[in-house]
Amino acid sequence: MMRRVANIAVLLVAAFLCYGMQTTTPHYADLTAPIPVYGKIQDTILTRTFDIAVDKVVFARTLKFDQFGKQNLLTSGGVWAIVTARLDAADRSAMVAAATWQGPDRLNYRTSERASSAAGALPIALDPGVPGRTRLVFEILPSQVSGATLLVSGKLAGPLDSEARIALGSVATQPNGLPEGVTETYELGDTF
């Protein structure tokens, strides 16, 4: 009888230890997640392969651009967020392959494919000593404007690579929920 109680006790201790190890050990996705490099607007964030500095963020209801000699308008049920940034390769040729707008509710928005032909699509190739500028366009909900973070990385899936996480700050909102200073139409021209 004593041996049976001891076996049950050893089994319960082993089950408790296994459960404890399972709940306290980091998941594989956490171990291989991108390595964040934090900053804010106007800061130059130095990642492992590229440097980025966000100059400004503009919000618009409609995008206007020329394509093949024809003028196009893109409307949105939400709002367009246009991010202008400076890029440079750190010490060798690099790529910027992914950009994500992460709202305060942790909703993620990739760069808009609808506006990619006008704004320039990712990936962007960078060479050292040749600074570049880019315009990243996101189609987002107005509730995801204030307190957002811009995530920029050199790879689409960046395990064990650095990722710039740029705090975009708070934005005042109008009574209708749109951000303060939203323009009705933003023209995506060649100038930044």
Image (tube, grey):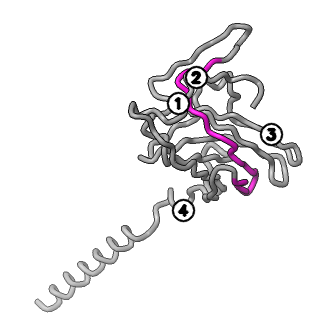
Q: CA–CA distance between discs 2 and 3? A: 23 Å
**Between disc 2 and disc 4, whose residue precedes?**
4
> Between tags 4 and 3, which lies in front?
3
Could you tell me which quadrant the C terminus lies in? Answer: top right
Q: CA–CA distance between discs 3 and 1? A: 23 Å
Label placed on residue 122: none
> Where residue 170 appears, x then y in whole percent?
51, 48
Q: Amino acid at mark 2?
A: Arg
Foreground residue among 175 and 123 = 175
**Between disc 2 and disc 3, whose residue precedes?**
2
Q: Residues within 10 Å of mark 2 (few under 14, many from 20)?
A: few
What residue sits 69% from the left and 54% below the top?
43
Judging from the image, what secondary structure is the residue with disc 3 in? strand
What residue sits 73% from the left and 36% below the top?
134
Q: Which residue is mark 4?
A: 31
Label placed on residue 139: 1
Q: Which residues are magenta?
A: 43-64
Asked if labels 1 and 2 touch by Cβ distance under 8 angstroms, the answer is yes
Magenta stretch: includes residue 57: yes
Seen in the image, is 122 located left or right of residue 89? left
Asked if labels 3 and 4 touch by Cβ distance under 8 angstroms, the answer is no
Q: Residues within 10 Å of mark 1 (few under 14, many from 20)?
A: many
**Between disc 4 and disc 3, whose residue precedes?**
4
Label placed on residue 132: 3
Magenta stretch: includes residue 176: no
> Where residue 85 appears, x then y in whole percent?
71, 41
Q: Label the magenta part by its dominant secondary structure.
A: strand
Q: CA–CA distance between discs 4 and 1? A: 31 Å
